[in-house]
Amino acid sequence: MVLYPGPRADYRNYQEPATLSLVVPKKFQLILHVLNTNIDGRKITFAITAIKSVGRRYTHVVLRKADIDLSKRAGELTEDEVERVVTIMQNPCQYKIPDWFLNRQKDIKDGKYNQVLANSLDKLHEDLEWLKICAHKIHLPSD
């Protein structure tokens, strides 16, 4: 039996390659909407990185704190598991994620440690652009 016959192969014993079927659970979601970001249904460790300012290392820590299997797909998560992940991402200090792991250390206003997520990051960027425009209007250096 020949799987891929060459130019001189005998075609009588040729058999098509087997196709693999994908078994999808009934409650599988192709796209999740978390923190105003659409997340694919692929592996959870890579899918959550679609949220701004969330990397793979932070995702691993959050999923371990939420007791979610790292090999699970994002589309297989229940609503309860998604809520747990979101609450841990928004309040990392309450779940004993170390301060050195967070992306906003010793905030200028209140001196606290935070993880700045998608919406806050966009707002900070817009504030910075607005400050540059104001500085330009009163002839200050914007750098």
Image: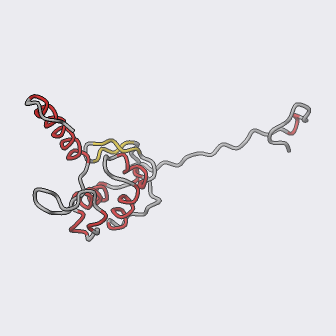
Q: Which one is in front, 19 or 117? A: 117
x, y percentage for residue 130? 14, 35
Residue that appears at 37% across and 66% down: 64
Q: How is the image coloured?
A: secondary structure
Q: Quadrant of the C terminus?
A: top left
Residue that appears at 14% across and 62% down: 111
Q: Is residue 31 left or right of residue 142?
A: right
Q: Quadrant of the N terminus?
A: top right
Residue that appears at 21% across and 40% down: 125
Quadrant of the rendered image containing residue 127: top left
Total labels drawn: 0
The residue sitting at the bottom extreme is 96
x, y percentage for residue 56? 40, 56
Q: Is residue 29 left or right of residue 124?
A: right
Residue that appears at 29% across and 66% down: 100
Q: Is residue 44 left or right of residue 138?
A: right
Q: Which one is in front, 104 or 2? A: 104
The residue sitting at the top extreme is 137
x, y percentage for residue 15? 79, 40
Q: Is residue 132 left or right of residue 74?
A: left
Quadrant of the rendered image containing residue 31: top left
Q: Is residue 82 above or below residue 120?
A: below
Q: Which one is in front, 70 or 103? A: 103
